[in-house]
Amino acid sequence: MPPFRTEAVVLRVQDFGERDRLVTLYSDEMGKFRGVAKGAKRSRRRFGANLDLLSLVRVHGFERPQRELLRIDGADLLEHVSNMREDLRSFAVCSYLAEWVEGCTALRQPLEGLLRLILDTLRRMTSDRGGGEELLRIFEIKTLQLAGYAPKLDACVACGGEIERKGGIPLDVGRGGILCRRCHRGNATGLRVSLGTLRVLEEARRIPMERTHRLGFSARSLEESRSVTRAFYIRHVGRPLRSSAFLDGVLRGGEDISARVSQIADRREE
């Protein structure tokens, strides 16, 4: 069995038998991969709390020929989200980000730059500047871009022509982007987005992460961007995000949200 060693973020941890855990991780070298952490339920020396959600770890073990699951013998903690266990908002955001990454990636197919994007997002989320909901929209569109799932927003997806830059601009998820008036004629379905939303999404996926704090999302742009990115996630992944309702409730400050933490945690272990 050939050995492996790589730096990766933890996307999901599930119980696996009486002693082990099944771990899903993402690495820029190996892509998304799954492995069995041997004795992880009992061995605090080798794993401890190093397998917390979105922790950056240096994981090592052995690949098993002709098998999807790797054998994970240890994980050294490099970074972790310090307040995730104590702060409901951080837990909700991390659950959402991990599910988003897991859905946008295929097994053993790395996306260049994704690990850095994840880490930059987490560091900004826990910094003094924070990030708010704007940071989520930026992360979503950049991840869709890396995965090749992003919508075409700079011209009509059907004919390549210019769009009329006023009023609500039609966006057809099935076709993969915005439509001009001629191509949209007779098709009343789909989303409509404002020119301001198109501009901020285009800018968000184009500029480096360290400059995205300059982007200004209006309340309307935040709402429309959320609809756009989630619609394209569903189109390509084939299912809605299970953590989205929980996150949205936390961000709105809804009541009885804390009672749903265990439900989300259980779903991450399914």
Image (tube, rainbow, N blue to C red):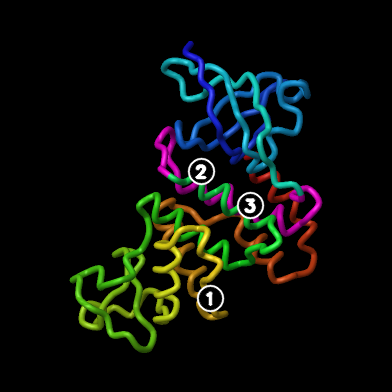
At label 3, the amino acid type is Arg
For label 2, the crowd category at 10 Å Cα-Cα, with few meaning under 14, some 14 to 19 and many 20 or more, is: many
Q: Which residues are magenta?
A: 83-112
Residue 216 is tagged as 1
Element assignment for label 1: loop
Q: Position of residue 258 (x, y in %)?
A: 79, 58
Element assignment for label 2: helix
At label 1, the amino acid type is Gly
Mark whose residue sits in front, 3 or 2? 3
Element assignment for label 3: helix
At label 2, the amino acid type is Leu
Is residue 98 covered in magenta? yes
Q: Is residue 15 left or right of residue 100?
A: right
Is residue 204 covered in magenta? no
Q: Is residue 242 left or right of residue 47?
A: left
Q: Kindly identify the residue that appears in the image at 65 percent across and 46 percent down.
A: 267
Q: Position of residue 264 (x, y in %)?
A: 69, 50
The image quadrant that residue 92 belongs to is bottom right
For label 3, the crowd category at 10 Å Cα-Cα, with few meaning under 14, some 14 to 19 and many 20 or more, is: some
Residue that mark 3 sits on:
123
Q: Is residue 51 left or right of residue 156?
A: right
Mark closest to the chain's N terminus, 2 or 1: 2
For label 1, the crowd category at 10 Å Cα-Cα, with few meaning under 14, some 14 to 19 and many 20 or more, is: few
Mark 2 to mark 1 CA distance (whole Å): 25 Å
Residue 66 to residue 206: above or below? above
Residue that mark 2 sits on:
115
